[in-house]
Amino acid sequence: MHETARPLIRLRNLSRIYTTEQLETHALAGIDLDIDKGEYVAIEGPSGCGKSTLLAIVGLLDEPSAGEYVLSGVPATEIDAEEQARLRNREIGFIFQSFNLIPEMSVRENVELPLFYRGGLTSEARRQAVDEALSRVGMTERAEHRPAQLSGGQQQRAAIARALVGRPSLLLADEPTGNLDTESGDRIMDLLEELHGSGATLVMVTHNPRYAERAGRRLKLRDGRIESDGVAAA
Amino acid sequence: MIASILLDLRHALRLYLKTPWQSALAVLTMAVAMTLVGGMSSLWSELHAGGSRGVENDKRLVTFGRLDSEQNNLIGAGPVAEFNRGAQTITQLTGESSFGHIRDVDLRGEPIEGSVAPVLPGYFETLTPRILHGRGLAEQDFAGQGARALVLGHRLWQERFGADPEVVGTEIGLDDHTWRVVGVMDESFGGIGRMPQLFWAPYKRFLLDFHEGLPEQMHETIPFWRLAGRLRDEASVESAEAELSQFIQNMPQKDNPMEAGPGQIVALPGLIGNVDEHFAAQKQVTLMLLATLLIATVATINIGTFLLARIPARNRELALRQTVGASRKRLAGQLLTEASLLVVCGTLAGLVLSLWLAAAMRELSLFERVSFSESLLNAPALAFSLLLAIVLSVIVAAIPLSRLRRQGLIHSARNASSRPGLFQHATGLVQLGLTGLLAAAAVGFLSHLWILDQRDPGLHPEGVLVTTLGFKTPPTGTFQPPPDEAKFSFRAEARERLGSLPGVEEISFGSPVPGQRAYAISTFRIGERSLNARVVNVAPGFFDLLGIEILQGRTFESGSEPGVVVSREFVRQAWGEENVIGRFLRRDQAGAGQADSRIIGVVEDVRYEHPEKPPVPLVFSSAMGFAGFMNAGLVRGDVDEALVKREIDEALTTHLDELKVVSVRPLTEIMAQLTERDRARTRITVLFGAVIVLMSAFGFFAMQRFLVDSGRRETAIHMSLGAGPAAVRRRVLLQGLKLGLPGLVVGSLLGLIGTTWLVDRYLIDDVSPTLVALSVAAGLLGILLLASAQPALAAARLRPGDVLKEE
């Protein structure tokens, strides 16, 4: 019996409205989007167009005001906060522009955090997984360093190791090279492509057209709507 | 300078009005602390000021008294004169009597009633009271039997002599005698006892004229005097205390017939109305003042934390100020102004409230026999409170300032650490440590009271009503008690009337009952020794009604039976544990010969004293005598108090018309008076404990909120990595436990040490410091968890997407 192919991410008529006392801001308005497993999607658009909001909702860090979101067949808008956390932990890996490493922890401890929250793993199993993740991003030598002792590029590598240590099905990157110089940014992009090459689904928000071109699919957002959705030019 | 302070004040006001509830809470916290500090420092300074109001020269005055003594009995007038002949430490020992009450004395055709001060020689020369007109009593007024010379009290002079200064030198009639007015006392002087006195008179002449029935030899031996003196230049209060103690110890017993036991003789600086009460009150208030200072410390930390919590949100503003040229000194001044505004508002409110507190505290039974002045907030207390407020302002301002310095002003809020730093650890430690100490005191006093209440009183007071009788009009000095027949017929009719009331099970009579202050002590001869015992006048049925166990022999079968019943303690002290039924007791009745009574029964000890004290020897008599007709009526059963009063009043009208029912109260309520001071002390300590617990809980809560708020980013990162709400809540609770654990340990240890100290001085030995410390530890743990609960819930409700986007 064949399983019906279903997208990893399915968004229908998704909207997000921020309300203040005086103002109602439509950050996202009627987004329809499917992303399949293994895709490499770049999201582009001017500041304030809703890129980061879309990524936060996809990553279950924010909730839509209306619409439907299904992640790996699970209706993400209908599950409680604990279940969302579990999905985030197992299915999603985040990479932020400002790295978001915890300054009081070593690189190893930062990378180990998702496994710690997953539970049920022995310390040996966690150690092996962390070593493997650090090795993949070339940060084994820096495992005991604190984030403040690393360069921006190294910090982002550590953040990528943390994102992939739990073997998530989806990697979400929000301007991963935004705080890096060109050389470091290129290296990070190489690393992300390598990860995608090994089977990861990658959704990346970027301002940089050079990096967007490297994605398999380019989404352009304007005023909270998808302006264009197409295959990137080779 | 002023313009810049005004600018800072306006900014501070705007800042606080942005969060009105939190600001109001901070002011309230300071107000509560300053209310307690103001009220307690006022009481403290007054109790330690010496209380020498209304004297010309208050230097080196000293008052003597006996601790743990209901009556302030020291020595009589004769021994005082003997002491003065060899006194090394004081110039002259003098005093006023504490039994100078007169009733229905005719003055210009109208009766006067009130307190009179019969005084010893040297009273006016030594104490130098302010005389408004004329002079005080001089040496010649005490010669022989004493002159009929008096110094009018200010109130009597105003009310009965129209404040006429010409009254000095005139003669006035008091009953059948003519007295010469030699002076008028100033309004400010109320005697050593600090009570309004009708007049001051030579003691011997007063006793002869107004206590005709008192044998003359007792004039020199009655020991009920408030004694005071003036220290010689080289002498100290302690040396005077030692000299008088030694003198009393070496005194032959004949001169001291009412020696009341082992109470320590003490001397206190100034003129003190009741030394025992004053001494106890000084100790109490000192402890309370210390407790309020601890509370003020916690309040300061709370307000500092409150200001600190605003720093992450204000970093940008302060950095901007710095970039446009504000120096660190200038910013420090701004923070000091902001802190001062809170502290000053709280202090002003607190000082106003402290007037109320000081007044309320004076009404407590703990201080009922302590004389206070009329002013509520005195100058030293005010100065102390204001000085403390200044210190607190500086400390409160220093807390956020230190944080700014450590962190650097140009850092943005996103770099604020969510981990507790040295400040949080230190304040958590101090808050919980002090809370543990005061909470342990509260738990210790509660345990103390509970244990006292559990002690067997030797009777069953539940369901017993006590009817107290009194005169309809005060008797005169020539009053004769009614004949025995009238008393017996009253009792018979009262029994009949009460017996017909629904719900009455048993009826008897007897006085005093445990808890009543008035009692008689008699001295009994046991071989060559003498033994003091309380004498209780009872009617048949007294022991059965109260459930007092009979150990040997029997109790009374009829009124005015010649035998006596004694308590177990009496037997133990008199002869040891042997059968004493049939022995005869010889009572020493000073000046009135001796009488023998046969012991017909021995009963279990009954608690007439504070339950912490050992039982006192008791002798129960059914002889009516003078006091017998005033015995309280005892009724056991479920019966209406108003009905009991009505029936006894009816029986009194028929047989003893000069008497009336003064009160009908449950015996349990009367017996509670034995521990009334313990209750008052417990109430205060529990109040202080509750205040500091609330403050600590609030402070800890504020600190946790601060950590959660400043750690939003870190929490959001954890959530983005898969931490669910439960994990976030757990993380905040664990953070609270880690932060509070050292304080919990220190608080419990301080609680253990504090309770051990209290057990040595104030609490019953049965209070276990270990159990108190453990309960405090459990309580502190509860505070930590409760204070962390809301911040934990708030952290778990965080929307990580919003927070990370803000960054």
Image: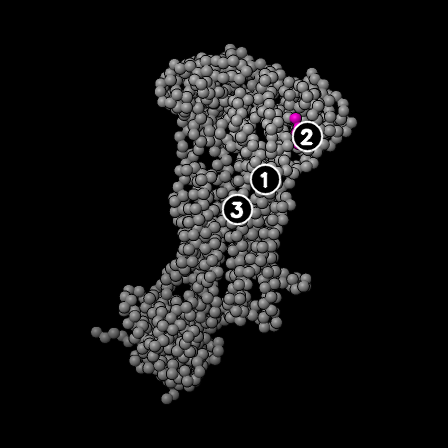
Q: Which image quarter: residue B117?
A: top right
Identify the magenta region. B121-126
User: Can residue A217 be found in the magenta stretch?
Assistant: no
Q: Which residue is mark 3?
A: B290
Alpha carbons under labels 2 and 3: distance apart: 38 Å
Instruction: Inspect the image, locate mark 2, and give the three-letter code of the amino acid beneath it.
Output: Phe
Residues at marks 2 and 1, common chain? yes
The correct choice, above or below, for B525 with respect to B451 in the image is: above
Alpha carbons under labels 2 and 1: distance apart: 24 Å
Task: Report the magenta stretch's main SS.
Answer: helix
The label nearer to you, 2 versus 3, is: 2
Query: Who is closer to the viewer here, B136 or A203?
Result: B136
Instruction: Decide which of tag 1 and tag 3 comes sooner along the chain.
Output: 1
Residue B732: image tag: none
Residues at marks 1 and 3, common chain? yes
Find residue A178 and report its horizontal and vertical position in percent. Answer: 44, 79
**What residue sits 44% from the left and 40% below the top?**
B759
Mark 2: few, some, or many residues within 10 Å (few <14, many ≥20)? many
Q: Which residue is mark 2?
A: B124
Find residue B165 and report its horizontal and vertical position in percent. Answer: 77, 29
Name the secondary structure under disc 3. Answer: helix
Query: Who is closer to the viewer here, B507 or B544?
Result: B544
Find residue B485 and report its horizontal and vertical position in percent. Answer: 51, 10
**What residue sits 46% from the left and 15% below the top?**
B586
Whether pointer 2 and pointer 1 mark residues with C-beta atoms closer than 8 Å, the reply is no
Find residue B37 and report its horizontal and vertical position in percent. Answer: 57, 47
Q: Which image quarter: residue B16?
A: bottom right
In this rendering, would A171 be left or right of B6? Answer: left
Of all chains, the one bearing label 3 is B
Residues at marks 2 and 3, common chain? yes
